[in-house]
C-alpha cells in the first residue's frame, strides 16, 4: 500500500510538472493515497487568480488553457479502475470546485457582454444609407469586434463547463462501479472447516499485531513519548475534571432525583444524563488521543490502532449515553418513552451488546484496511459479525418491547393504524428483519463485504431513526406543553406575544408540521451520508437543483422562486402594516367618514398587492417590459371567459373612486335592503336587517338603480301615519303629534317636525307626522318610540282610534247550507226546496 502510494505520488508529481511545462501526455500509474492525491491536484491547479473586470478578456485565454489542463489531469487520474471511494470523492470535489471557478468567469463575461451591447445600443441602429460620422463608425466596429471576441471566449468556457459535468458523471459512475465490485466480490464460504481454521489462525496473528504495535512504537520512541507527557497529563486532567464536574455537580443539581414535576423537567434531566454519561466521558477519551496524534507520539500502525480505537469508543459512549438518557433503565419516573420496565431492561441490555459488537467490529475493520488480511479471515469475521448483529437486532425488534405501557396492560390496540389494518411500525420491523437475515445469508455464501456493509448501515440507519423519532417526539411534547392552557409556558407565551389560545394552537400545529418536514429532511440527509454519499455529492445535488430551468431568456431556479415569494410576502406584510396603522393609529384621531377610511384602506391594499406582485416577478428575473406582451395575451382570454370578472373588478375600483356607495351606507337595490359591510374586488357584502349577508356583484351596483339613504349625510325623514275619527278635532290631534315628536331626543329640530293632512276615507281622517332624524339609521327605534308615545298621549286625552265599520251580507242558501249541511249526492234535485232571496244582517 505504501509502495503504491509512493509510486502514484511520483507519477502525479510528473503530471503536475508536465502541466507546468505545457505537456499533458502523461499516463496514470498506481492508485494514490487520498491526501497525496488532493495535494497533487491542488498543486496542478495552481493559484486561482481573481481577474479584474477591466482585464477579463486578456486573462481568460490563459485561464482557459489552465482549466483544460486541470480537467485533463482529472480525466487521467479519475479514469483508473483501482481508486477507492474516498479518492474518487476527492477528485469529484476538485472538479466541482474547478467548475465553480469557471462558472464565475462565465458570469463575468456575461456582465461584460451586457455592457458592450448597452454601449452598442447607445449608438443607435446604423443609418439606412450607411452614412454616419467616421468616429461613430469606427466605434461601432470596435464594439462589434469586441462582442464577437468575448462571446467566443464565452462559448469556450461553456464547453469547459460541459466537460466538467461529464467528468463528474463519469466519477459518479466509477464510484458506483467500485462499490458494486467491492460488495459483490465473493470470498471463500465460511461453512468449509478449512476456511474457518485458516481464518482463526490469521485472526490471532492480526490480533497480536494490533496489540503489539502500540507497545513497540512506544518503546522505540521513549524519549518522544516522555516529552509529550506534560501536555498529555494536562489535557487528561482537564477532561477528567470536566467529567467529574458533570457527574457530581451537574447531575446532582439537575439530574433525575426524586419525582419529576413536569415533562420539561424530565427532558432537562435526560439532557444532563446524556452529557455526564456520554459526552463528558467521550471527551476524556478523545482529548488525550488528540494530543498524541498532534504531537506525533506514535506512527504507522500504532497511530492507526490508537485513532481507530478512540473513534469507536467515543461513538460507543455517545450512543449509550443517549439511550441511557432516554430510557432511564433504573429510574422509571424519569423515563421519556412510555415503555414497561421489563421491556426497558431487555432493550437496554440488547442495545449494549449490539453497540459493543458493532464498534468492536468497526475498530477491527478500520485497522484491517491497513493490513493485508487473508480472504479466509475476512470471510470468517463477516460470518461472526453478521450472526451477532442479526441475533441481537432480531431480539430488539420484538413488538411487545416497544408497546406503550398502558397499551401493553390493556392488551388492546385502538390506534387508527390498527383499525385500518396498516401498521407502519410492523412494516418497518419486517423490513429490518429481512435485511438482517439477508446479511447473514450474504456472509454464509461468501459475500463478506456485502454482509458487513449491509448490517453496519442497517444499524446506523436504525439508530438514526431512533434518534430522530425521539427528538421529534421531544420537540412535539414541548409544543404540547406550550399549547396546554394550564401550564406556565402557555401563560408566558400569552403574556409575551399577546396571542389567544386559538392562535397558539394554530401556531403549534404549523410548528409540528415544520418539525415533521425537518425530521424527514434530516432522515434523508442522514441516510444519504450513511450509505456512502459525501458532503460534496450532496452539495452537487443541491446546486443542480438550485440551478433551475430556463423559460425563454429567464432562468427559473428554486432560489429565485424562494426570493420572489419572500419579496412578495415582505411587501404584503408592509402593506398590511400600513393599513393597520391607518385604521388603529391615524383614522381614530381624524373626522374622516368611515366610508372614506375604508376606500383609502382598500386602495392602499390594492396598490400594495400590485407592487408586491411586480416585486416578486422582478425578483424571479422576468423583464417587466414583457408584461405588456403577457397582458396582450391575457386580453384574448379576458374578452371571452373573464369578461364578467374583469367587469366586476373594474366596477369595484369605480365604487372605491367615485363612491356612490360606501361602507356603512344604508342602501336598497332590487329586493335587497341593508347596510354595506364590505366592498371587495369582485362583489360587495350587504347585511340585511335580518342579519343575513347578501353578496352583490359590483357591476350590478354600477349599472342598476339603487337607493342610498345615507349617500351625502345621515339625515333622513320618517312618516308616522295616524287615523283620526270624524268626531274628533284634527287640530287637537295634530298638536299632540307635534308635541310627541318635539320631545324625542333623536328628532332633529331643523327642519322642524310638521303635520301633513293626508286626506279622507270611509272610516277616518288621515294625518301624517313627518319628522327628520339626525341619523336615519335609527329610524326603527324612533318610529317605535313615536308610535308608543302617540298611542299613550291620545289615550290620555280621551281620543279613541276609529274602528272600521263592517257590513256582512249573507245569502239564504248559504245560511241553509251552514245549518242543514250540504245536499246528499243521491237526492233527487227535483224535490229540493226552491231557492229563496237574500238576507241582510
Image (tube, helix red, strand yellow):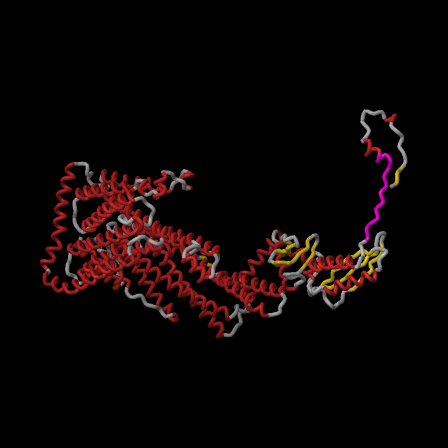
> Horizontal and vertical percent for residue 36?
22, 58
Q: Which residue occupies 35% across, 59% down?
A: 160
Horizontal and vertical percent position of residue 535: 31, 55
Name the spot of residue 310 as percent of width and height, x first.
Answer: 20, 55
Q: Nearer the viewer, residue 5 or 303?
A: 303
Instruction: Tell me the quarter of the picture where residue 560 sits.
Output: bottom left
Q: Nearer the viewer, residue 564 or 274?
A: 274
Instruction: Tell how many labels.
Output: 0
Q: Position of 369 compared to 408: left or right?
A: left
Q: Tell me: residue 441, above or below residue 364.
A: above
Q: Quadrant of the C terminus?
A: top right
Residue 326 or residue 501, whichever sits in front: 501
Tell me which segment is drawn in magenta: 802-815
Front in this rendered view, residue 840 or 54: 840
In this rendering, position of residue 663 left or right of residue 813: left
Judge whether residue 85 can be spotted in this image: no
**Residue 806 highlighted magenta (yes or no):** yes
Decide if residue 169 is on the left or right side of residue 419.
Answer: left
Quadrant of residue 704 in the image? bottom right
Residue positioned 17% across, 42% down in the render: 376
Q: Is residue 429 visible?
A: yes
Q: Magenta includes 711?
A: no
Amino acid at each position: 500500500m505504501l509502495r503504491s502510494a509512493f509510486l502514484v505520488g511520483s507519477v502525479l508529481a510528473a503530471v503536475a510538472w508536465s502541466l507546468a511545462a505545457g505537456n499533458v501526455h502523461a499516463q496514470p500509474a498506481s492508485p494514490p493515497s487520498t491526501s497525496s492525491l488532493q495535494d497533487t491536484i491542488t498543486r496542478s491547479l495552481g493559484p486561482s487568480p481573481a481577474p479584474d473586470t477591466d482585464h477579463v478578456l486578456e486573462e481568460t485565454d490563459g485561464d482557459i488553457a489552465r482549466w483544460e489542463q486541470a480537467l485533463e489531469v482529472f480525466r487521467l487520474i479519475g479514469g483508473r479502475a483501482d481508486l477507492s471511494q474516498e479518492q474518487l470523492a476527492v477528485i469529484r470535489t476538485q472538479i466541482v470546485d474547478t467548475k465553480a471557478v469557471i462558472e464565475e468567469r462565465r458570469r463575468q463575461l456575461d456582465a461584460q457582454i451586457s455592457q458592450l451591447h448597452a454601449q452598442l445600443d447607445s449608438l443607435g441602429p446604423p443609418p439606412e444609407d450607411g452614412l454616419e460620422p467616421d468616429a461613430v463608425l469606427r466605434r461601432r466596429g470596435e464594439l462589434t469586434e469586441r462582442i464577437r471576441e468575448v462571446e467566443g471566449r464565452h462559448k469556450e468556457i461553456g464547453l469547459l463547463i460541459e466537460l466538467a459535468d461529464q467528468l463528474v458523471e463519469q466519477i459518479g459512475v466509477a464510484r458506483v462501479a467500485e462499490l458494486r465490485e467491492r460488495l459483490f466480490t465473493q470470498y471463500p464460504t465460511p461453512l468449509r472447516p478449512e476456511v474457518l481454521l485458516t481464518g482463526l489462525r490469521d485472526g490471532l496473528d492480526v490480533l497480536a499485531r494490533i496489540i503489539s504495535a502500540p507497545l513497540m512504537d512506544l518503546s522505540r520512541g521513549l524519549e518522544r513519548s516522555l516529552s509529550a507527557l506534560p501536555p498529555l497529563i494536562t489535557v487528561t486532567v482537564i477532561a477528567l475534571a470536566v467529567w467529574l464536574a458533570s457527574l457530581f455537580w451537574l447531575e446532582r443539581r439537575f439530574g433525575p432525583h426524586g419525582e419529576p414535576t413536569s415533562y420539561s423537567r424530565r427532558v432537562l434531566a435526560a439532557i444532563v444524563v446524556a452529557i455526564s454519561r456520554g459526552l463528558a466521558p467521550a471527551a476524556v477519551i478523545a482529548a488525550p488521543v488528540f494530543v498524541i496524534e498532534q504531537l506525533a507520539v506514535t506512527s504507522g500502525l500504532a497511530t492507526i490502532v490508537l485513532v481507530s480505537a478512540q473513534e469507536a469508543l467515543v461513538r460507543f459512549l455517545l450512543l449509550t449515553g443517549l439511550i441511557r438518557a432516554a430510557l432511564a433503565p433504573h429510574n422509571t419516573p424519569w423515563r421519556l418513552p412510555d415503555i414497561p420496565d421489563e421491556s426497558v431492561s431487555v432493550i437496554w441490555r440488547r442495545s449494549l451488546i449490539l453497540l459493543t459488537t458493532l464498534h468492536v467490529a468497526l475498530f477491527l475493520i478500520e485497522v484491517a484496511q491497513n493490513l493485508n488480511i487473508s480472504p479466509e479471515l475476512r470471510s470468517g469475521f463477516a460470518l461472526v459479525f453478521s450472526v451477532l448483529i442479526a441475533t441481537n437486532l432480531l431480539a430488539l425488534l420484538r413488538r411487545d418491547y416497544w408497546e406503550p405501557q398502558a397499551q401493553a396492560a390493556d392488551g388492546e390496540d385502538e390506534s387508527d393504524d390498527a383499525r385500518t389494518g396498516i401498521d407502519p411500525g410492523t412494516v418497518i420491523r419486517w423490513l429490518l428483519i429481512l435485511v438482517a437475515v439477508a446479511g447473514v445469508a450474504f456472509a454464509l455464501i461468501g459475500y463478506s463485504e456485502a454482509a458487513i456493509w449491509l448490517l453496519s448501515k442497517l444499524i446506523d440507519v436504525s439508530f438514526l431513526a431512533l434518534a430522530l423519532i425521539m427528538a421529534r417526539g421531544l420537540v412535539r411534547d414541548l409544543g404540547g406543553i406550550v399549547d396546554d392552557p394550564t401550564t406556565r409556558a402557555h401563560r408566558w407565551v400569552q403574556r409575551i406575544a399577546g396571542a389567544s389560545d386559538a392562535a397558539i394552537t394554530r401556531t403549534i400545529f404549523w410548528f409540528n408540521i415544520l418539525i415533521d418536514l425537518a425530521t424527514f429532511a434530516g432522515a434523508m440527509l442522514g441516510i444519504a451520508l450513511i450509505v456512502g454519499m459525501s458532503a460534496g455529492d450532496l452539495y452537487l445535488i443541491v446546486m443542480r437543483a438550485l440551478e433551475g430551468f430556463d423559460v425563454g431568456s429567464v432562468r427559473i431556479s428554486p432560489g429565485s422562486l424562494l426570493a420572489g415569494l419572500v419579496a412578495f410576502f415582505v411587501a404584503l406584510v408592509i402593506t398590511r402594516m400600513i393599513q393597520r396603522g391607518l385604521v388603529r393609529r391615524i383614522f381614530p384621531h381624524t373626522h374622516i367618514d368611515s366610508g372614506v377610511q375604508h376606500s383609502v384602506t382598500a386602495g392602499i391594499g390594492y396598490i400594495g398587492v400590485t407592487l408586491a406582485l411586480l416585486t416578486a416577478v422582478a425578483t424571479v428575473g422576468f423583464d417587466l417590459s414583457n408584461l405588456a406582451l403577457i397582458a396582450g395575451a391575457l386580453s384574448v382570454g379576458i374578452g371571452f371567459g373573464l369578461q364578467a370578472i374583469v367587469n366586476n373588478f373594474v366596477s369595484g375600483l369605480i365604487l372605491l373612486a367615485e363612491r356612490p356607495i360606501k361602507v356603512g351606507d344604508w342602501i336598497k337595490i332590487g329586493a335587497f335592503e341593508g347596510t354595506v359591510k364590505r366592498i371587495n374586488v369582485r362583489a360587495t357584502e350587504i347585511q340585511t336587517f335580518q342579519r343575513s349577508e347578501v353578496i352583490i356583484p359590483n357591476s350590478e351596483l354600477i349599472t342598476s338603480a339603487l337607493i342610498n339613504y345615507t349617500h351625502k349625510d345621515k339625515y333622513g325623514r320618517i312618516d308616522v301615519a295616524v287615523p283620526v275619527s270624524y268626531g274628533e278635532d284634527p287640530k287637537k290631534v295634530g298638536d299632540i303629534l307635534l308635541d310627541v315628536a318635539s320631545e324625542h331626543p333623536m328628532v332633529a329640530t331643523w327642519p322642524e317636525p310638521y303635520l301633513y293632512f293626508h286626506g279622507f276615507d270611509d272610516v277616518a281622517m288621515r294625518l301624517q307626522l313627518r319628522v327628520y332624524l339626525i341619523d336615519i339609521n335609527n329610524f326603527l327605534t324612533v318610529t317605535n318610540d313615536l308610535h308608543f308615545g302617540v298611542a299613550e298621549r291620545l289615550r290620555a286625552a280621551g281620543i279613541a282610534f276609529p274602528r272600521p265599520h263592517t257590513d256582512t251580507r249573507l245569502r239564504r242558501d248559504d245560511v241553509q247550507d251552514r245549518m242543514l249541511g250540504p245536499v246528499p249526492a243521491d237526492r233527487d234535485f227535483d224535490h229540493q226546496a226552491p231557492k229563496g232571496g237574500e238576507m241582510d244582517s
